[in-house]
Amino acid sequence: MAVAYYYDHMTKPKQAAYRSMLAGLTELSDSFQLPLLDARELSEVFLQLRLDHPELFWLETGYSGKYMGNGQCVEIDLKYNSTANDLENAKKSFDAAAQNLLSGAENLGSDYEKEKYIHDALAEAVTYDLAADRNQSAYSALVDGNSVCAGYARAYQYLLQQLGIPCYYCTGYSGGNHAWNIVKLDDGYYNVDVTWDDADTIRYNYFNKTDADFASTHVRQNLSVYLPACNGTAYRQESVAAGDGQQTNVVNGDGTVPDANGGEETTSAQPGNSLSDYINPNPQEPLRYPGGNTGSSDSVTAATPAPRSDAVTDLNSYYANCITQLSILGSGDQHFDNVVSKSLWSTIEQAYNTGAYEQGYVAEVLKKLGMENFVIQLQLVDLGDGYYRVYHNVVTY
């Protein structure tokens, strides 16, 4: 049961291109015509198609296109991995491997029980391997049994979709590019990272977590910033290992854990706000900040923090740092971060709200890269000790 989240949120022209692309790759067409889209729109549709359909394991992550003089694409050439050489048998192997895991979950009573069973079964079945073949596909995890985070996340997405549980593929930054899942249960959405829970003993450190739980380790990027915020409470998981007589506990919405006798054991308070509080989904709207502040006069002034060698020290240094990083990264869809004090952030946020940042660094970046357009989304992670890490998701074209 596929959940076409991105398709449902597309414009009609993009939906038409999405359908054409889906039909073409299902038939293993090497190239085919599309409704007219510019290069950026085509890139988004291709990515959204892959995000919606983990079962398309034979599709590679790249493509090429033929463009008219005005930049619109009229034909796309897709790339396929080695499973396309015998796709019929590859599909049989994929379905059999998936069913082997699904069979143990299908008769369980609740969606929570099913998602937890699949979490454990997948972690048990897959070995993390950077050298794994086809490691960006669900096939690598389910059939080969060796993959990286992309394979784990796509396999988990596919398996939960087959059980009728909405599950999305989420990408972002976790010390490097990373992928995990967002799962919908009856009271809301949760983050699940099977890759990071796959240890010698399966654990639940990254299972059914809120955005606040993930704030210090996982930062959404690209299209994933538009996925639903994870604020569910009824099934939020305590970080304990499975097996060896250790109990897996679901944490109540008030931060307590029910014990075996129906009483409650107090747990520590959770971290600060949801990452959704830090996301600016529309670059034309005012940025949002930790604590719900929107640059109003009653914002709290941060105490003077201890110096950090990796922190930028003033607004001009921030601009210079952005120019340097973007000049190295180049045009297109890019990501970078820097560390700023909370007191400096109040100055930076004013620059974004007033548009001063455009002359501060954007104009020079566009000139250096030979581009004309600039789109940015920002996310903040509170590092403590008076500092934020500012994540920049930038597209230049």
Image: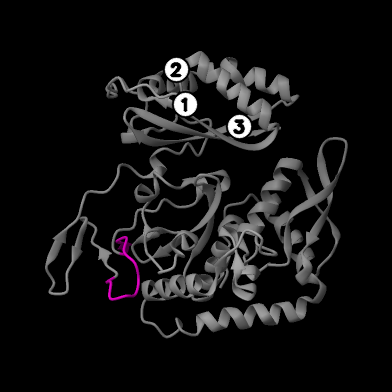
Magenta stretch in the rendered image: 235-247
Percent coordinates x, y for residue 214 in the rendering: 39, 49
Query: Residue 333 location in percent, x, y?
Result: 65, 38
Q: In which quarter of the image is the N terminus?
A: bottom right
Amino acid tagged 1: Asp
CA gap between label 1 and label 3 equals 26 Å
Viewer-side label of 1, 3: 1
Q: Residue 313 carries which label?
A: 2
Residue neighbourhood size for the residue with mark 2, other residues' Cα within 10 Å, grouped as few (<14), some (14–19), many (≥20): some
Residue bearing mark 3: 375
Q: Which corner quadrant of the image does residue 383 belong to?
A: top left
Q: Main secondary structure of the magenta part?
A: loop
Crowd class of label 1 (few under 14; some 14 to 19; many from 20; radius 10 Å): few
Q: Mark 1 points at which residue?
A: 310
Between residues 389 and 272, which one lies in front from this camera angle? Answer: 389
- Give the structural element (helix, strand or loop) at label 2: loop
Are the residues flagged by discs 3 and 2 in contact, CB closer than 8 Å? no
**For residue 243: magenta?**
yes
- Residue at horizontal 61 percent and vertical 27 percent from the top: 325
Mark 3 crowd level (few <14, some 14–19, many ≥20, 10 Å Cα): some
